[in-house]
Image: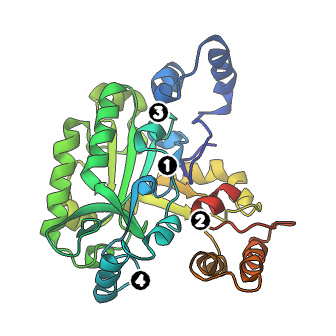
């Protein structure tokens, strides 16, 4: 692969041009390859390659491994009244099911980075803490339900990891729901620019000089130059102008060329991958970060069937019928069981 990829958990390692693969193979045969330090270990053969020349393994909805049972304020498609009611009710009823429909990850962000992941899909919202209906708000991660800890706690873990791995770079895209062009209260409902800027100030306090200076062009700055300057954290911000005051240590998420290719058990994404090299070169020429998501979802009917199985009694074999209906919606031949969680559906992709 020759372009950045984000999926539920992309297992492939970044590689550069094909002519270097034989050298890479000889290194892997002679030395133990350390996924937590793959950029550092590959430095001798990366040469003047830029970040846009690499494939960065990434995770989708990265912080969902630590979701609570509390629905976040401002979740997409919900107004403030219904969102507030569900925020108060879900810890008592239904929250566990909703969490299971939003969780895409099963390991911590530190374990992701140790496993070679270098792109983090960081979704967040200004909301009251989990299990609380009143009190001051703060920024939490989310995907339906909100995270158990404040968003800054996960960023501190990333900072600690970067300090322990001085040759590695990490790319973070901050948004509420992966739309690089949506801004203001469309992106973060019920928030003010000042509240958003307070969060970015915390980001700067956490990462300090590690933040990439966006006055540079990514397609003209080599990986070696970024390592030497110790600018090893790239922060793509949705709502860049208001959330960061157009900061020179953040990048506008509009510079992300976000591709949502077909995923699942079929081969719908193969056409894009066949043209991957050309797509990468096109984005690189425009100084854009090409992001290809293989994230899949569960059919709406399957979620409904899973909810029936979870909340309704089994009357005259109804659970078995709903399980078969759920399995049929997967369109996988001979599938007989119902994938009841989003993680289950992700493992089928």
Q: Earlier in the sequence, mark 2 or mark 3?
A: 3
Residue 345 left/right relative to 92? right
Residue 284 numbered mark, or none: 1
Quote the CA–CA distance across marks 4 and 2: 21 Å
Q: Is residue 287 visible?
A: no
Instruction: Point out the frontmost of discs 2 and 1.
Output: 2
- Circles 2 and 1, Cβ within 8 Å, touching? The answer is no
Q: Earlier in the sequence, mark 4 or mark 2?
A: 4
Q: Earlier in the sequence, mark 2 or mark 1?
A: 1
Quote the CA–CA distance across marks 4 and 1: 34 Å
> Looking at the image, which residue is at 55% across and 42% down?
55
Quadrant hosting residue 331: bottom right
Instruction: Point out the frontmost of discs 4 and 1.
Output: 4
- Mark 2 burial class by Cα count in 10 Å: few <14, some 14-19, many 20+: many
Q: Earlier in the sequence, mark 4 or mark 1?
A: 4
> Looking at the image, which residue is at 36% across and 71% down?
91
> Looking at the image, which residue is at 73% across and 83% down?
318
Mark 1 falls on what kind of element? helix
Instruction: Point out the frontmost of discs 4 and 2.
Output: 2
Instruction: Point out the frontmost of discs 3 and 1.
Output: 3
* Residue named by callout 4: 77
Residue 79 left/right relative to 32? left
Q: How is the image coloured?
A: rainbow
How many discs appear?
4
Residue 341 numbered mark, or none: 2
């Amino acid at each position: 692969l020759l372009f950045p990829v984000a999926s539920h958990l992309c297992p492939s390692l970044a590689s550069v041009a094909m002519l270097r693969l034989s050298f890479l193979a000889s290194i892997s045969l002679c030395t133990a390859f350390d996924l937590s330090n793959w950029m550092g270990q590959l430095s001798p053969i990366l040469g003047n390659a830029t970040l846009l020349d690499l494939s960065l393994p990434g995770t989708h909805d990265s912080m969902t491994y630590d979701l609570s049972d509390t629905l976040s304020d401002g979740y997409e498609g919900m107004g403030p009244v219904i969102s507030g009611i569900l925020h108060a009710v879900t810890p008592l009823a239904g929250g566990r099911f909703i969490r299971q429909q939003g969780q895409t990850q099963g390991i911590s962000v530190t374990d992701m980075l140790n496993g070679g992941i270098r792109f983090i899909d960081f979704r967040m919202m200004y909301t009251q803490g989990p299990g609380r209906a009143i009190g001051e708000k703060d920024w939490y991660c989310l995907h339906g339900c909100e995270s158990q800890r404040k968003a800054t706690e996960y960023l501190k873990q990333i900072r600690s990891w970067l300090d322990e791995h001085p040759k590695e770079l990490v790319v973070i895209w901050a948004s509420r729901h992966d739309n690089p062009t949506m801004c203001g209260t469309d992106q973060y409902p019920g928030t003010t620019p000042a509240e958003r800027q307070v969060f970015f100030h915390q980001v700067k306090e956490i990462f300090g000089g590690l933040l990439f200076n966006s006055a540079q062009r990514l397609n003209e700055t080599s990986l070696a130059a970024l390592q030497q300057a110790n600018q090893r954290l790239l922060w793509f911000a949705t709502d860049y102008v208001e959330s960061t005051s157009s900061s020179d240590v953040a990048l506008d998420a509009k510079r992300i060329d976000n591709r949502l290719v077909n995923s699942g058990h079929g081969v719908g994404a193969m056409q894009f991958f066949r043209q991957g090299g050309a797509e990468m070169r096109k984005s690189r020429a425009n100084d854009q970060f090409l992001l290809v998501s293989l994230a899949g979802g569960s059919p709406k009917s399957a979620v409904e069937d899973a909810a029936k199985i979870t909340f309704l009694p089994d009357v005259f074999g109804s659970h078995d019928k709903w399980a078969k209906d759920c399995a049929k919606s997967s369109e996988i031949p001979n599938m007989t069981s119902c994938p009841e969680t989003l993680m289950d559906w992700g493992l089928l992709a």
